[in-house]
Each structure stands twice: as C-alpha cells, then as structure tokens.
C-alpha cells in the first residue's frame, strides 16, 4: 500500500516555490517583451546600422543561462551592487528573453509585405501611423506563437536560478526530498505543478491568439 511522509506543509511549500517561479517568469517576460519589441523593430528597420546590437544580443543568446546567472551573481559582489539573488534571476532571464524576443519580433515585422506598407504611406499615413495601425497588428499575429513558446521556455529555464540560492519550485522539491527521501513522488508533484501552470498559460495564449486572428 502506498504511503508517503509528504505533509500538507510540504505542499504549501511547493505552492510557494511555484509562485516564485511564476513571479520570475512574469518579470522576465515583461523585460523581454518591452526590450525585445523595441530591438526587433530596430533590427528589422535598420539591419546594417544595428549590427552591433545584433552582436550583443547574440552573446546573450549563445552563452548558457547558468553561466550568466553565476557571472552576474558574482559580479554584483565584486562591484558592490546591493541587489538580491531574486533580482539577479529575473534580470538575467529578462535579458535572455529580450535577446530571443528580438528575433521573434524581427521575423514578425519582416513578414509584413512591403507593398502593404507602401500602400499605407501612399494613402497619407505617417511612419508612426503605419507602424501602429499596419505593421504592429500584422507582426503581432505572426510573432505571438513564438512569443508564447518563449514564455513557456523561460518558465522552465527559471529552474536554473536554484544555483544562485533562489528557493523556487525546483529548489523546494529538492529540499523536501532531502528530508523525506522520496524523489519519485516529490519530483512527480513538482513536475505536475510545472505542467498545470504551462497548461494554463497555453490555454490563455490560445484564446488570445484566436482573438488576434479574428480581429
């Protein structure tokens, strides 16, 4: 007969860890979306002039996240920055998300037919009006699925913050398992938490995508 030493307090601890994961993901995606959208438009509009920006972003895309976490967490002590590991976590995740979101947005902008933009300008629309009313809505429809996948990837990558001392979902599972030594059951529960959150995000994303396609 199945028995476990997992208690209700352990489940509450896991929920708290899951909430930290959600907070990290939300803050990282806020940073990534804002800067990724800006950089994506710059890369699409000025491909040659923005080569230095592309190089910098490529560095953040290429260097493993774990190394970025460790480097920034160590650098803050050397430089004397008084920021928490949680801040380090969402900043690194946010910069990483911005680097990836840039290419997603860039692809969306480049998917807008040039003939459509030229037609809008010939009708008297300014560059800003063209961007807001023509380019942005079409680019958003194209880029949204990639952005949604990026958010799910960032949520899973947030598990790496355990290496800099943040007690998120994975770390809580590790600590509980250290106490009760039931890895199969504990990490199954943790995986279930990840699945439920991912499923909820996917469902909301699918609804938002349908609305975008119907507008």
Image: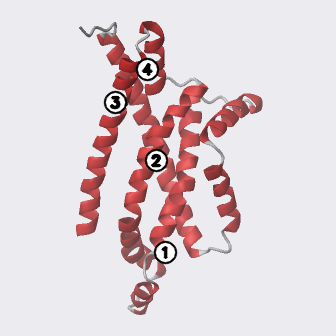
Q: Earlier in the sequence, mark 2 or mark 1?
A: 2
Question: Mark 2 sits on what residue?
Answer: 29
Q: Residue at x 48, y 11 (%)?
A: 178
Quadrant of the image occupied by residue 82: top right
Marks 1,3: beta carbons within 8 A = no
Whether residue 215 is visible here, answered yes or no, is no
Q: Which residue is mark 1?
A: 110
Residue to which mark 4 is pinned: 173
**Residue drawn 26% across and 10% down?**
2
Q: Residues within 10 Å of mark 4 (few under 14, many from 20)?
A: many
Q: Residue 108: x and y, percent?
A: 45, 69
Give percent across and percent down for residue 149.
Answer: 41, 52
| Residue named by callout 3 | 193
Label 2 to label 3: alpha-carbon separation: 20 Å
Answer whether labels 2 and 3 touch (C-beta < 8 Å). no
In the figure, is residue 67 to the left or right of 184? right
Q: Residue at x 42, y 17 (%)?
A: 183
- Tag 4 secondary structure: helix
């Amino acid at each position: 007969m199945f028995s476990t030493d997992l208690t209700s307090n352990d489940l509450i601890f896991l929920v708290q860890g899951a909430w930290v994961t959600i907070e990290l993901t939300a803050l990282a995606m806020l940073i990534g979306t804002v800067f990724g959208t800006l950089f994506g438009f710059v890369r699409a509009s000025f491909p040659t002039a923005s080569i230095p920006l592309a190089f910098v972003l490529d560095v953040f895309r290429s260097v493993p996240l774990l190394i970025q976490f460790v480097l920034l967490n160590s650098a803050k002590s050397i430089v004397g920055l008084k920021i928490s590991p949680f801040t380090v976590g969402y900043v690194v995740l946010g910069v990483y998300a911005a680097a990836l979101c840039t290419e997603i947005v860039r692809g969306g902008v480049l998917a807008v037919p040039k003939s459509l933009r030229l037609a809008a300008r010939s009708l008297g629309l300014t560059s800003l009006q063209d961007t807001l009313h023509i380019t942005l809505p079409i680019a958003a429809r194209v880029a949204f699925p990639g952005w949604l996948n990026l958010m799910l990837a960032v949520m899973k990558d947030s598990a790496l913050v355990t290496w800099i001392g943040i007690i998120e979902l994975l770390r809580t599972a590790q600590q509980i398992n250290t106490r009760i030594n039931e890895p199969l059951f504990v990490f199954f529960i943790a995986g279930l938490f990840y699945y439920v959150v991912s499923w909820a995000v996917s469902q909301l994303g699918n609804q938002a995508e349908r609305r975008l396609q119907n507008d």
